[in-house]
Image: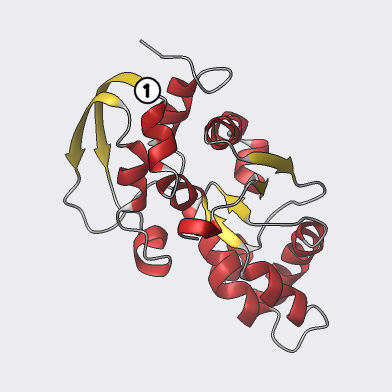
Amino acid sequence: MKGGDLPDAVALFPTCLGDLITPETVEHAQGALEACGIEVRAVRRATCCGQPAFNAGYPSQARRVARATLRALAQTTGPIVVPAGSCAAMMSRHWVGLFAGDRDADLARQIAARVVEFSAILADRIAVLEDLELQWEGRAAYHDSCHMLRELGLRASRARSSRPCAAWSWSRSRAPIAVADSGDVFGAVSRSLGGDGRQQAR
């Protein structure tokens, strides 16, 4: 999404990890999106994208798990924001193949085309973030995750999205493959947005 395609509202898919293990990551993502002037709509009855079973070589089981989420997302409108690179890659890059020949094949294509990774949508709102004059003093290391880099081609979006944080000192990792998923770096950014997205964290 570029230029005039920037959305006014999005559906935020929390992912199963975000929903059950790190709900604060989802809350931070919602806060950051709202601070950018984007209306965030909840996704109900969605569970998992099916990635664990898919990666383990069990496509039938992955399809069964993913179908519930696919149909839940079909009840939403607009871009589907996913605060996890691996989940966004699974949904946008592999759901079409996973559901090929299935009764939900057309639906999978439609939903896959709407998936946007969280940092990519923030990167398109840089001007808005810079106007917030965020303050977060500290040092952070940026590491290109394997799914973000190799499947989604988002080498720079996370770094660009974090740029508006004043006094942030960057150290770029030299390792070629990430050991963490989306949400680690952006916790600091979203926390600096505060309750209404306009507080300055010290």
Question: Crowding at label 1, few (<14), some or many (≥20) Cα neighbours within 10 Å?
Answer: many
Q: Is residue 114 above or below residue 101?
A: above
Tell me the SS state at disc 1.
Answer: loop
Seen at 63% across and 57% down, the residue is: 79
- Using residue 59 as the reference point, say whether residue 128 is left or right of it: left
Residue 12 visible, this angle: no
Q: Nearer the viewer, residue 114 or 173?
A: 114
Seen at 54% across and 53% down, the residue is: 6
- Using residue 166 as the reference point, say whether residue 187 is left or right of it: right
Residue 114 visible, this angle: yes
x, y percent for residue 129: 41, 34
x, y percent for residue 85: 47, 55
- Rendered-image quadrant of the C terminus: top left
> Where, by quadrant of the figure, is residue 33 drawn?
top right
> Where, by quadrant of the figure, is residue 166 drawn?
top left
Residue at mark 1: 134
Q: Is residue 84 above or below residue 64?
A: above
Seen at 78% across and 84% down, the residue is: 102
- Using residue 105 as the reference point, say whether residue 56 is left or right of it: left
Q: Nearer the viewer, residue 20 or 29?
A: 29
Q: What kind of residue is marked 1? A: Leu
x, y percent for residue 34: 59, 33
Q: How is the image coloured?
A: secondary structure
Residue at the front extreme, as displayed: 4
